[in-house]
Image (cartoon, rainbow, N blue to C red):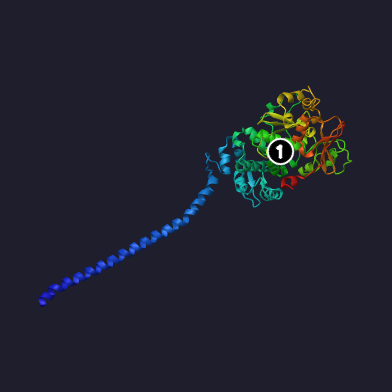
Amino acid sequence: MKKILIIILPGITLICILIFLLSVFNLNTTSLKTKKTTQENSQKKIDKKSEPVKEILVKKQTKVIEITDCKNPKEYIDLLNCIDSLTEVSLSLKSMTVISPKGQTQTGVEYLLNIINHYNGASGFKQKEYFFNDYIEPYIFNYVDDKKYIARVIHMLWYEKNKNPQWSLRDYSKQEVASIVWVNFLHGHEANFPKREQNNFTDSSYNEWDTDSLYKLYPLALQFIKPDQEQTIKNVLRWQKKNFFHAYYEYTWNVYLDDPEQKWDTLPKPETIEDLFNERVTGCHENTFLFVNLLRSINIPAIYYADYWGHGIVYLPSIDKYVHGDHIADFVAVTPDSILIDREELHKIDYKETYYSSIIQDKFLPPNHLISNLELHRKGDSLHLETNSVCGEIEEKNANIINKEVPEFNVTREPNSCLTKSNLVPIKSLEQLVEGK
């Protein structure tokens, strides 16, 4: 028996040791698997948390490294990088240095991309003032013109991206884009004006308010948009000629002086754009300048030539027509088709073959001359139409033209009378026109 136990016990002991070792091994294996599974789950949680961060980083990097989608440009940086006519604009912005109120330096592109999403070109006066006062005025630019330039670029890009225009910057030349964003721009368009010895092609800005407060015109200009550029241009002309009149004996440019009795050597000008809308007294320069900037506000190229035999002239490259500022001021009932003159007609004025007003008057000879002889005048705080130079009844054809061009005035005339009557139309301030008051 003892011998049997001696033989069996070592075997049993060995088996117990083996079982113990196997148990320990399985326990360690399970622990390792559990630990590995826990680590994997933890890593998955970390990865899930980090995914949005990666997306945000990619989006932020898009602006920095300028990744663009030219097939479907949706971002402002895409417009700058993908539209060929904006090449010079993009280069100009990249070369600009802009310093924030805290002293941080950035390029013009970085500055524009940081603030443009806060801009709404269709907003009213107050919102516009907040934007310009908060996002543009506090910043320091190398040159004063850079600030004016970038303000125009912001609006131009906003209009291209947000208004789904019937016309696009993609269809323009670099010169046409430049005529939208530069206040003083003629370079590249000299050939569009007849050559003469006195013609030095000096384009000049009209006044300081042309750059500092032109944003106030933006929402007004949006009201004139039609399906195409030509219709829109005519719509602006139709509105402007029945809202601004040429200075005359009762209302002269002296309204823009602090003392109306003051004598002057240089023609008085409105100090602010609001003054122009409050008084409505103009000549060729006020009208061409206003006309140009209403069109530029809706991305229609317009070239302002401020010294054409002493007169203001506008060239419209998209329709290859010209507008003389005095024609807007003098011919309230004349159709826009007649006010838009071609190069041959401008040539006649240029070489003194005809007087500038005769270009229009010759299109409306008797018995149609009432159309070109109606004058817009002011009475108190209202506008009205009158003429004493044409007598007799208004022919049906002429009446139809007048009613189409100036329906709110309701022009009438008594039989066998030379006196024309019309409604009084109240004068509204720029803010009232913009806010729809």
In the picture, measured across the screen, residue 42 lies left or right of residue 94, that is left
The location of residue 356, given as percent across then percent down, is: 79, 27
Instruction: Tell me: 379 left or right of 170.
Output: right
Q: Quadrant of residue 122?
A: top right
Q: Which residue is mark 1?
A: 293
Looking at the image, which is closer to me, 160 or 129? 160
Look at 74% across and 45% down and name the residue there: 433
Q: Is residue 407 above or below residue 9?
A: above
Pinpoint residue 167: horizontal percent, then vertical percent: 62, 36
Can the viewer see residue 433 in this picture?
yes
Q: Amino acid at mark 1?
A: Asn
Residue 416 position (above or below residue 298): above
Q: Kindly tell me whether residue 271 is visible in this rendering.
A: no
- Secondary structure at badge 1 equals helix
From the top left corner, tell me how far across and down residue 75 is, in percent: 56, 44
Q: Disc count in the image?
A: 1
Q: Could you tell me residue 86's position as x and y percent?
A: 60, 37
Relative height, residue 353 to residue 270 (above, below): above
Residue furthest out toward the bottom: 2
> Which residue is depicted at the point 50% across and 54% down?
53
